[in-house]
Structure formats: structure tokens, C-alpha cells
Amino acid sequence: MWRYDDTRAAMRDALRLSRAMTYKSAVAGLPLGGGKGVIMLPGPVDARRRKAALRDFGDTVDELNGKYVTAEDVGTSAKDMETIAQQTKHVTGLSRRRGGSGDPSPWTALGVDAAIRASLERKLGSGDPKGRTVVVSGMGHVGAALAKLLARAGAELVVTDIDRSKKQLADQLGARWVTPARALTLSADVFAPCALGGVLDHESVPALQVPIVAGAANNQLADDPVADLLAERGILWAPDFVANAGGIINISVELARGGYDPDRARRKVEGVGDTMREVYDLAQSEGDTPFSAALALAHRRVDEAH
Ligand code: NAD
């Protein structure tokens, strides 16, 4: 759920996000396709209109008869899924109390943490975040959970958000707070984009001062050639649709026969690290960027499914 300048921008975002979901499920080896719903809110929206928009969205999901199953993402919560569930049963990520697997964000963060460790190992020789400086941009559901995991592992944290109220959490974690623009040019070990897409472009990438970019945001590349630019600068980029698969992996456990099991979910989500290594190995053996290698893997899995 987001504010867009016009419906064309919202439509473009839905198409890009659904493509990423397809790649994400394919690379993670899940028996799922890919889809995304975008709710465009005209502002200002009060609680009543917001609820009405969620109900309308629930009706739309219901008409698809289970071909599309919805879940939380940016701008929505487990509580919002309960509103949608009043209109359709094709909802995941409902609270544990309601028989669901809850908010997927902590699982997404756990997967990104595994991707960061695999990237540190590949680029800097050790996967241990202790003493490494990590810049987390976007302290929302996933970014905050990731920052907590990294703080616990002994990383030096620098964080940012356009919402200054998030500084309180930064202080609690002992993290340094910078502006979003400054976060993009800081000298550090890892830049972790955890806000919205398009953050890596032909202006930001030349200014980056990090050997690794690995984060949760969907569609981090403004366009596909940015992947080549990152490689030319010697920056290891963890393809977003590989690194941020933890949430959908957790949801796949909810959809599996036998129902939800958090221990199984944790084991599967931690497997994001192995998938990341597989992508880096493939990239190295083919002389490709990690982005091309991850795309090739996704296309191969989709073809196999056909
Ligand atoms: P969220 O809405 O909870 O958090 C996003 C945060 O980014 C907010 O705090 C917002 O203020 C901040 N932000 C927005 N623009 C910014 C900017 N220019 N610079 C710095 N901060 C900015 O969303 P979320 O659920 O944490 O998702 C974050 C990203 O991860 C999104 O791109 C989302 O699509 C992706 N993602 C989320 C999940 C999930 O499980 N929630 C799964 C896969 C991918």
C-alpha cells in the first residue's frame, strides 16, 4: 500500500513487483508463482477509507479464486490482513492467533541477515558481521528487525529513515543516525537498502563507498544495466529477489500440507544463505553478474515447472 503520483506509476510498480515475486519464488525453489497487489491511496486517507480500500482489495483477491494469495508488504500489517480476510479466505500472514504465520517481516530480515553473511564471506573472507559496519537504509518492519539481528551479532550500525521518529530505535540499538542521502555515500562494509525500490541508479552507484550491497527492498535497481555498473565498480550486489525471499519462504510453510511450523520455517529461511552462495558460484563460473546468474536460475526453475 503506497502513495503514487498517478495510476500509471502504480501499475508499473505492480508489474515490476510481480515479476520480482516470480523470480523470488523460483530461485528459492518454492512451489509458487508470483503476483503482487498494489493499493494506491489518494491522500489524505482516514482510518475508515483505508479500511474500505482494504475490503475492496479483499473482494478483488476473492474473485481470483485462489490463483492469487495475498500477504503483508510495505504499508500493511497483520491487522490489515484481518480486514482483508473479512472478504476472502485467500490471505496469508494472518496473526498466529488466527492460525496464520504472522508478520513475514522478521523472516525477511532473517533471510537478509543470511544473505549479508554469505556476501561478507564471499567478498571479505569471513561471514561474521562482528565489527563490520553495516548501513541500514529504511527502519521499517524489515529494516528494524535486520538492525536488531546485526546489533546482536556485534556489527557497527549506521541507520537512516525519512521518518525521524525512527531515530529512537537507532538510539536504543546504539546505532549512528545519518540522513538518507548521506547513507548512500558512507564508507562502510555493507549498504543494506530496506526502504523502497530504485535506490541503485546511475547517480547513486558511482557514489557508493561499500564493497557489498545486500538488503530487503524490492526492485533496488532503477534499471537492469545498473547491475553491470555495480560489477564494474567491484561492488558485490546480492540480488534483491534472492536476499529478501525469507517472508515468502515462511508463507510457503504456512501453505504447505501439515500447516505452519516455525522451526521448519527458520531452517528454510536460513537456506537463503546457501542460495546466495549458489548464485555467486554460478556468476563466477559463467563470468556473469550475480543479477544475470540469479535471473538464469529463476528462468531455469520456471521452465522446469512448465
Ligand atoms: P515498511 O513500510 O515497514 O518500511 C519502509 C521504511 O522505509 C519506512 O520506515 C519508511 O519511512 C522508510 N523509507 C521510505 N523511503 C525512504 C528513503 N528514501 N530513505 C530512507 N527510508 C525510507 O516496509 P517493510 O515491510 O519494512 O519493507 C521494506 C522493503 O522491503 C520494501 O521494499 C518491501 O517491498 C521489501 N520487502 C518486504 C518484505 C516484508 O516481509 N515486509 C518482504 C520482501 C521485501
Image (spheres, rainbow, N blue to C red):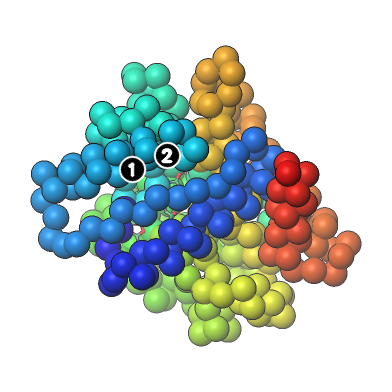
Looking at the rendering, in which quadrant would you find the C terminus?
top right
Q: Residues within 10 Å of mark 1 (few under 14, many from 20)?
A: some
Check the image and report above or below for 59 versus 168: above
Q: Residue 105: give x, y in percent of width and height.
A: 44, 42
* Residue in the image at 56% along x and 75% along y: 223
* Residue at the image position 63 percent from the left and 60 percent from the top: 239
Residue 64 — which label?
2
Q: Is residue 177 visible?
A: no
- Amino acid type of the residue tagged 2 in the rendering: Leu
Count of number-bearing discs: 2
Residue 228 lies in quadrant: bottom right
Q: Position of residue 292 (x, y in %)?
A: 73, 65
Question: What residue is pinned by disc 1?
Answer: 60
* Mark 2 → mark 1, Cα distance in angstroms: 7 Å
Q: Amino acid at mark 1?
A: Thr
What x and y, as percent, mark residue 73?
Answer: 40, 47
- Is residue 241 rendered to the left or right of residue 35? right
Instruction: Residue 27: give x, y in percent of width and height.
Output: 68, 48
* Residues at marks 2 and 1 touching, judged by CB atoms closer than 8 Å: yes
Q: Quadrant of ligand 1?
A: bottom left
What crowding class fits label 2: few (fewer than 14 Cα within 10 Å), some (14-19), or many (20 or more)?
few
Whether residue 99 is visible here, answered yes or no, is: yes
Q: Which mark is residue 27?
A: none
234 to 71, vertically: above or below: below
Residue 100 in the image: above or below residue 173: above
